[in-house]
Image (spheres, helix red, strand yellow):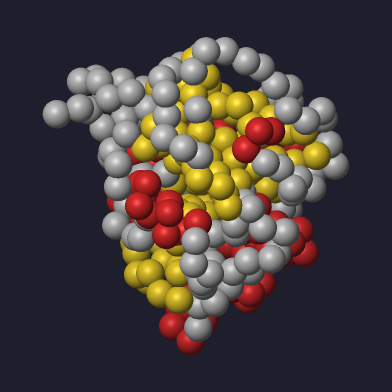
Amino acid sequence: PRQDSSASSQPIEAQPPLRVTTVPQGGATPGEPGSQEQLFTLSRNVNQVIVPVMVKDDSGRLVSGLFPRDFSVFEDGKKVTLNFFTSDPSALSAAIVFDTGMPDVAVQKVIQTLPALEGAFSQFDEVSIYTFSSSFSKVQDFATVGRQLEATLNRLKNVTGRNNGPPVTGGPLGPQGPMVNGRPIQGGPAVVITPAKESHVLNDAVLAAALDLAKRERTRRKVIFVISDGREFRSNASYRDTLRVLLSNNVLLYGVSVENSAIPVYNKLERLHLPRYGYSNILPKYANATGGEIITGFSRDAIESTYAKALGDARNQYTLGYVTRATPSSAYRQIEVVVARPDVKVTSKDGYYPAAAK
């Protein structure tokens, strides 16, 4: 959810003392001791909720220098008391999901930007790579930035997308009806060709990446980085089931929208969901629910610039934590984060599914 003003309410219950770690912007590295070790210890408590939060000003720049007192967190409308806070940058466990089912012109444009994508990661990050179209595949398991990642990205240069343009189903170049001596029979039955609609299993690819991220170290920020036009059709996994895995494992989804979804008019129209036709752009739903972000890039230069921006935003979020009540139910709980600063945009996950009490 996104808010720009503070609010107050009654806390759910008394909470453990607040643990605070703050550093100047860029003043810490993921290898430094302190908050990351604290986060690992806290995350072992099944009742501990971790909430990454991104705060930007009205010009889109990250807002640094905030303290715990600047944040108010509400769970299902009730204010909670923070017991963890850090502004340290986080090492990333990032899963790159590359849509090879886009038109080939878009796929080739993305391939030309892959060196810039590699350069957006730091030596502390680990990266896995998946591709998808009518099916999905893991191209590389998690590895640190280096020769292995470079070799994998080089192999992707041979990938091609789908043929450009719609299939020809009518007219003089399309299928014809019954003919005699090269002439169509008058009154013959019209030939109607309905091209098969190919599957585009974005949900399945995202779910596979999320399940792999669930096994990575808890101290890392877990991110799925989707490069796609956002089309989803005929996945085995539903949006709801995939989202549950994302939220249960604190995974953020960032999307680089390319092709038509990068054009503002198309970007609004393509978010429609038509029954039996899937989603024409499902990425905004995932990003809004997980606390990620969608960044558009139509040209090669624009796509390259989005890589560093998206990964920098993911790395430099505030991390808040609180203890929630334990109940037998694992029903969805909604989260709202409010920042006591004017004219800021706050981005966090919309909620989570708690582990049921035993």
Q: Quadrant of the N terminus?
A: top right
Relative image position of residue 172 (x, y in whole percent): 59, 44
Asked if residue 158 is positioned above or below residue 62 in the image, the reply reads below
Q: Is residue 49 shown left or right of residue 164?
A: left
Tell me what residue is drawn at x 70 percent, y 21 percent. Answer: 6
Q: Quadrant of residue 178?
A: top left
Tell me what residue is drawn at x 37 percent, y 47 percent. Answer: 42
Tell me what residue is drawn at x 33 percent, y 23 percent. Answer: 325
Tell me what residue is drawn at x 74 percent, y 49 percent. Answer: 64
Q: Quadrant of the C terminus?
A: top left
Who is closer to the viewer here, 106 or 42? 42
Asked if residue 215 is positioned above or below residue 328 in the image, the reply reads below
Residue furthest to the bottom:
147
Q: Can residue 1 be seen in the rendering of this structure?
A: no
Who is closer to the viewer here, 39 or 222? 39
Relative image position of residue 320 (x, y in whole percent): 53, 40
